[in-house]
Amino acid sequence: MVCIMTSFTLHSRLAAGSHFLGRAADCQVLLKENASFPWLLIVPEVADGVEDLHQLEPARYAEVMELVRELSLFVSAYFKPDKLNVACIGNQVRQMHIHVVGRSEGDAAWPGTVWASTVKSPWEPGRVGEIREAARRILNLE
């Protein structure tokens, strides 16, 4: 049985490379610090050692996947990419996290992967706040 932790610590690499947008479904929603791509993360607040989606209880899995769907709809409507990439990889950071990345033909990594891209640009001042406000309003984030 997999339990949600009452105390949760976000992995230091995820914290250092992202902006907190809010919480929903006992998950943290983050915006990657790379304005080259609309790249958001869902970090389920689960016990240490729970790294992959199949390890979640069925009801918890359904909650997380519904948030993936809702965040995907948000990224599609707000950023208007050509394609969405969704992945739960975790080869470098083992803490469970799901990437929702908007991709557009001609973006800095197209057609390759964003993970292999060396192009990194910070968000312009104020832009993170705009995205946070939109995400909180549309997704009802805490």
Image: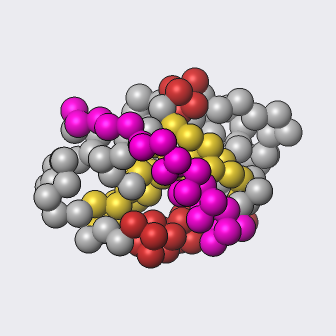
Please say if 105 is above or below 50.
below
Percent x, y of residue 57: 70, 57
Magenta residues, start to end: 118-140
Magenta segment includes 58: no
Left-right relation of 19 to 59: left
Percent x, y of residue 115: 29, 40
Please say if 25 is above or below 99.
below
Q: Residue 21: in sight, yes or no? A: yes
Q: Residue 62: in sight, yes or no? A: no
Residue at x 80%, y 39% (from the top left corner): 5
Quarter of image, res 10: top right
Percent x, y of residue 80: 35, 72
Closer to us: 8 or 142? 142
Closer to us: 127 or 34? 127
Left-right relation of 45 to 7: left
Please say if 104 is above or below 21.
below
Percent x, y of residue 79: 39, 66
Location of the C terminus (image quadrant) = bottom right
